[in-house]
Amino acid sequence: DSHFELLVLAILLSGRAVLCVGPRLLPFQCHLSGLWRNELGSLMEIREVNDAGEFSGEYLTAVTATSNCIRRSPLKGAQHEMKHRGQPTFGFTVNWAKFSNSTTVFVGQCFVDDKRKETLKTMWLLRQEVGSPEDGWSATWGSSPFSSQSSLTGSRGL
């Protein structure tokens, strides 16, 4: 046994070994479906994620640059395959066509802590319609954490 350990140590020290470490197994799995609220008070409902990882839902923003009445806006997205991972990455698009000429894309990861609190950590890019290519610099970007509005075992939905 000690010869094997020395051989492994020699291989590791030579720099020729590649270690593959699997993902840390977590006691809880984070689920995207449900009702979420971000730090600005915007609400998002994600409906059930299908077997292909696709989902849809609605987004009700609490902030806007337009003077038009804010309306619920459709969202569509996909989540990375969940086979052995409890905290998936995802992306979705919100089409603000009901009250604005802009689109926002979000990318993020769903986390669940040891107290079973689910959080989405996202980054987003908002693109507004502009009159010319020279005005394309006016895209807005940022990050938003979302908190689940129900427990893992509680009810979900608007």
Image (tube, grey):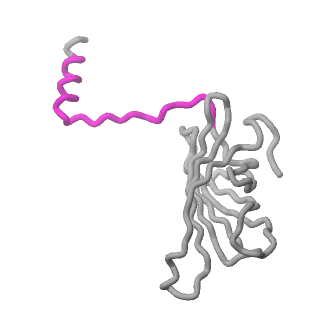
Q: Visible in this render: residue 73?
A: yes
Q: Nearer the viewer, residue 95 or 64?
A: 64
Placement of 97 over or under 60, stated as above or below:
below
Read off the magenta span.
4-29
> Going 61% across and 80% down the picture, which residue do you hit?
129
Q: Relative to 110, is 2 on the left or the right?
A: left
Number of numbered discs on residues: 0
> Going 69% across and 44% down the picture, which residue do you hit?
147
Q: Quadrant of the N terminus?
A: top left
Q: Nearer the viewer, residue 15 or 8?
A: 15
Placement of 110 over or under 142, stated as above or below:
above
Q: Can you give x and y, in whole percent of width and height, for residue 29 in the image? A: 63, 36
Q: Residue furthest bottom?
A: 132
Q: Can you give x and y, in whole percent of width and height, for residue 114 in the image? A: 62, 28
Q: Can you give x and y, in whole percent of width and height, for residue 70 in the image? A: 79, 69
Q: Nearer the viewer, residue 50 or 65?
A: 65
Q: Relative to 12, is 126 on the left or the right?
A: right
> Going 57% across and 55% down the picture, which residue do you hit?
143
Q: Nearer the viewer, residue 56 or 116?
A: 116
Placement of 158 over or under 5, stated as above or below:
below
Residue 30, by quadrant, is: top right
The answer to if 40 sits in the magenta stretch is no
Q: Relative to 31, is 149 on the left or the right?
A: right
Q: Residue furthest top?
A: 2
Q: Can you give x and y, in whole percent of width and height, for residue 15 in the image? A: 19, 35
> Going 28% across and 37% down the picture, which residue do you hit?
18
